[in-house]
Amino acid sequence: MNIHEFQARELFAEFGVATQPGSVAHTAEEAKNVAAGLGGKLVVKAQIHAGGRGKGTFKSGFKGGVHLCETPAEAKEIASRMIGEVLVTHQTGPEGKEVGKIFVGEAVDIARELYFAILIDRSTSSPVVIASTEGGMDIETVAEKSPEKILRLIVNPFLGLMPYQTRLIAASLGLTGPLMTQASKLFTNLYRLFIERDCSMVEINPLVVTPDGKLLALDAKFNFDDNSLYRQPSIIAMRDITEEDPREVEASKFGLNYIGLDGNIACLVNGAGLAMATMDIIQHAGGMPANFLDVGGGATREQVTAAFRIILADKSVKGIFVNIFGGIMDCNIIATGIVEAAKETGLSIPLVVRLEGNNVEAGKKTLAESGLKLESGENILDAAHKIVAAVKAVA
Ligand code: ADP
Ligand code: MG
């Protein structure tokens, strides 16, 4: 799960991570009021779940999702050109994201822009700190052009981020004296936030040094481990479903693992491994999957029906491939769910089903007696070829 920058700042305040004052606004008028309360130079920033806003462009032609300005009236003017408009950045894809709210904050004089992030390193199963003197630009670009400017430091999860490590990172960023003290405190607090709130990524880009010697987090990108959300009520409260794929939001209500993709063959599968294999085999047979959908090991009839409804609501779907291996799963539950959902939604696109395993005979009987127009696959490959051919025939 992701959150907005203004919400990340609330977490910064709670954990003692230095940042500049400001707050969120939902209308241009509100932006003006927030600006009036701040005084001094201002920054107005579009709040979307994507980075690269500074260099982004609105579909209206207005350039930049991050603007500096001088007066509340200007802040209002800029806000009115952002709110309700679609911002395209290199992270949003060409369709962009509609801006529903903005952040108005104090502008900061910047002497240096640094980069600091904490994420999980899968190869060592540990948190890893990434730091660089090249803040303000894409870390991927830095990694490609000047990898020597990136520090990677593995943190032992049992010991946590040790004081000597915070000083080492600060030194590698050229932060000495009082700045090193501020940096050590900021890194320690941010690491505590990372652990206590079950983050999978925290990225501050840029972390800035001001001419008068302050260290401030000016931007924040957070990612939380979805599997830990059950114990993070304050994080769940920050969820903004308008930023998420509506198909994925609907699927999560039913406890389904669904990820929307760009192809036209929908898959309904039990088990993440089989779901991955199914997507591969569809491509192998010459098709393109429209989604990843894992109904889980013990799916109920309601879940299968919901899964079908979500698939069929997607206009780009031209065919459905149901691939079930019944281990714990009873094949007849899947079959009953398919029949119900197909009747409810008036299924009119090709459907290929491969059922195997627990109670498969009853499942096949349910499908056969339903009167539904569907094809059965002998095995996965056969089924994949059948659905690809069926979709090509209607296209
Ligand atoms: P994004 O990464 O989405 O483009 P940032 O918050 O990093 O958004 O802003 C882009 C750039 O705008 C920063 O690298 C920084 O140079 C500048 N900037 C951001 N916030 C401020 C601020 N409060 N004061 C001055 N400059 C800022
Ligand atoms: Mg940034």
Image (cartoon, rainbow, N blue to C red):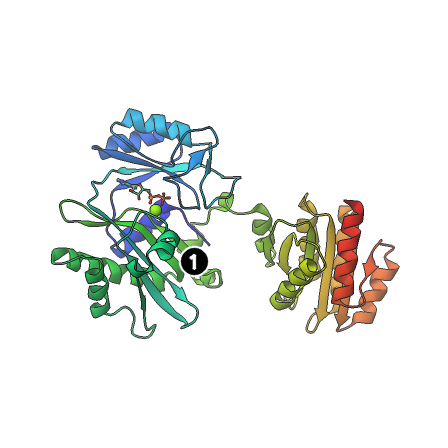
Q: Which of 268 and 232 is in front in this view?
A: 268
**Residue 368 place in picture, x, y as percent:** 87, 61
Give the position of the C terminus as an image quadrant: top right
**Horizontal side of residue 393 vs 293, given as left or right:** right
Residue at point 75%, 73% (across, down): 357
Most distant residue in the left direction: 177
**Residue 137 place in picture, x, y as percent:** 34, 48
The residue under label 1 is 224
**Horizontal side of residue 100 vs 29, given as left or right:** right
**Residue 111 place in picture, x, y as percent:** 19, 45
Judge the density around disc 1: few (<14), some (14-19), many (≥20) Cα neighbours within 10 Å: many
Q: Which of 78 and 31 is in front in this view?
A: 78
Question: Does any atom of ligand 2 lie closer than 8 Å to the CB of label 1?
Answer: no
Which residue type does callout 1 highlight? Phe
Q: How many labels does the image show?
A: 1
Residue at point 25%, 38% (across, down): 106
Q: Can residue 302 be seen in this view?
A: no
Q: Nearer the viewer, residue 245 or 330?
A: 245
Q: Nearer the viewer, residue 143 or 145?
A: 145
Q: In this view, does 163 lie above or below 39?
A: below
**Residue 168 place in picture, x, y as percent:** 21, 66
Q: Is residue 49 visible?
A: yes
Residue at point 83%, 58% (across, down): 375
Residue at point 45%, 63% (across, down): 228
